[in-house]
Image: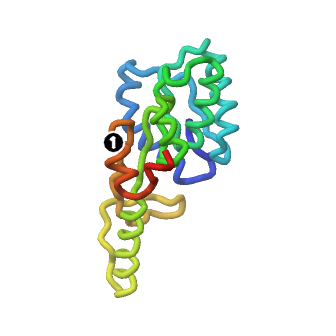
Amino acid sequence: MGGSPVDNNAKLFRAGQMKVLKPYIDEGKIKVVGDQWVDGWLPENALKIMENALTANNNKIDAVVASNDATAGGAIQALSAQGLAGKVAISGQDADLAGIKRIIAGTQTMTVYKPITKLADTAAEIAVELGEGKQPAADATLNNGLKDVPSRLLTPIEVEKTNIDSTVIADGFHKKSDL
């Protein structure tokens, strides 16, 4: 379940997901039974897409790769209506509070967390380097649709039930009392 089709981030996320999944798809170990973009990243659009996928596949879906926690939430609503929430593995991204709560409840399997402090610190370092007239170090090149842009990529963190405290709580991204 991709994000918004007009958001370049959604396309980058999908490319990363497919880089991991494609070998398994090619070997026949994974069968893709639905693959749609979610207009506007809206949970209600994800809900409709998931309802249609469940209907088309007689509720026989083993896993959902959702490109963010909001779309995962919409898909989980559809799964819940069929008594499948917690029985179908589902990923998300952003480590939003609702997603973390769903992980604790067992209806969402995991989320991708990008520590904001690390993102901000790295952006500040790059800004200072640019301000000093230096060329910031890059470890990759990404195409933004117009040109290739030198980029510095950070490693995201998988958050699941077993490491919530050591990731999003330890970083102060969420408070334990909010969970």
Q: Quadrant of the N terminus?
A: top right
In the displayed structure, would residue 63 be above or below residue 121?
above
Hey, which residue is sitting farthest bottom in the picture?
A: 132
Element under disc 1 = helix
Above or below, 35 against 145 in this view is above
Give the camera-side residue of 91 and 129.
91
Q: Residue at x 53, y 63 (%)?
A: 146
Identity of the residue drawn at 63% across and 51% down: 6
Query: Could you say which quadrant of the image residue 136 lies in?
Result: bottom left
Task: Inspect the image, locate mark 1, and give the three-letter code of the amino acid beneath it.
Answer: Asn
- Farthest front residue? 177
Q: Quadrant of residue 119?
A: bottom left
Q: Residue at x 39, y 64 (%)?
A: 117
Q: Nearer the viewer, residue 77 or 13?
A: 77
Q: Quadrant of residue 45?
A: top right
The image position of residue 179, as x and y in percent, is: 49, 44
Whether residue 94 is visible, yes or no, is no
Q: How many marks?
A: 1
Please state the horizontal and vertical placement of residue 157, each as a whole percent of the image: 35, 48
Chosen colour scheme? rainbow
Q: x, y percentage for residue 20?
A: 37, 36
Query: Is residue 67 left or right of 19 when viewed as pictured?
Result: right
Residue 88 placement, left or right of 5: left
- Establish if 158 lies above or below 26: below
Name the residue beneath numbered marker 1. 163
Q: Which percent across, then down, holds residue 33?
A: 54, 22
| Residue 139 visible somewhere in the drawing | yes
- Residue found 38% across the figure and 36% down from its top: 161
